[in-house]
Image (spheres, helix red, strand yellow):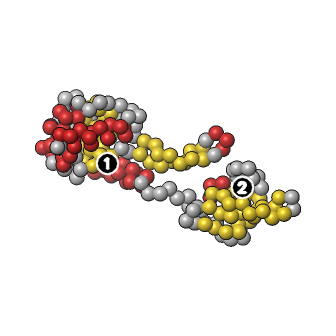
Amino acid sequence: MAWYALKVRASQERKVSQRIRQELDRLGLGHQVVDILVPAERVLESRKGGKKRERERVFLPGYVFLDIPVEEYVPELIQVLRGVPDVLYFVSPSRGAKPLPLPDSEVGPILSRARAASLPMEVSQDFEVGQLVRISEGPFAGFEGYIAEVYPEKQRVQVRVKIFNRETPVELPYHHVEKL
């Protein structure tokens, strides 16, 4: 596999990758590019009101990577991709020079980081039934209680908190609970 970097307009990486695929399919050149990679990862971000949300973020804005199996395809692809909107140029050693494949030492970390994003994001917690915890977010923030049940497949826990001298079960995601 030979990976080539393509400079594109920032924040247009996903659209450009779709346009490239469509253009290659339209011209019957789909076999010349094995894979198109937009380097993205999943992140957990805090929103207004303390809510957390998982989203996908491009970690190398302005770049798309192409897996081109045969070096002879590159000159033809340069001509084809120049016509795709928001594509700027192939990354090469100098202006106007033929692009070179990226070394494995550079592309390896990018690929592994991007492929890790395709896996479901897991919050690694090892909660146990009976463990004392504090609720850190939501309407019960600040309350303390103990874990009654753990639902690892849903990444949630049931916490029993005392409200008005009465135990009340509250089901929460892992990231709303912290160990004491």
The residue where tag 2 is placed is: 135
**Horizontal side of residue 144 vs 125, given as left or right:** right
- Nearest the eye: 31 or 38: 31
- Which residue is drawn at the image coordinates 47% and 57% (left, top)? 120
**Which mark, residue 165?**
none
Dots 1 and 2: beta carbons under 8 Å?
Answer: no
Q: Is residue 69 left or right of residue 122?
A: left
Residue 74 found in image quarter? top left
46 in relation to 162, above or below:
above
Q: Residues within 10 Å of mark 1 (few under 14, many from 20)?
A: some
Q: Between residue 141 and residue 85, name the one nearer to us.
A: 85
Tell me if 82 is positioned left or right of 17 in this view.
left
Residue labelled with disc 1: 107
Q: Mark 1 or mark 2, which has the lower sequence index?
A: 1
Q: Residue at x 55, y 65 (%)?
A: 153
Determine if residue 124 is in view.
yes
Q: Amino acid at mark 2?
A: Ile
Residue 53 in picture, x, y percent from top left: 57, 47
In this view, the residue in front, 152 or 74, is: 152
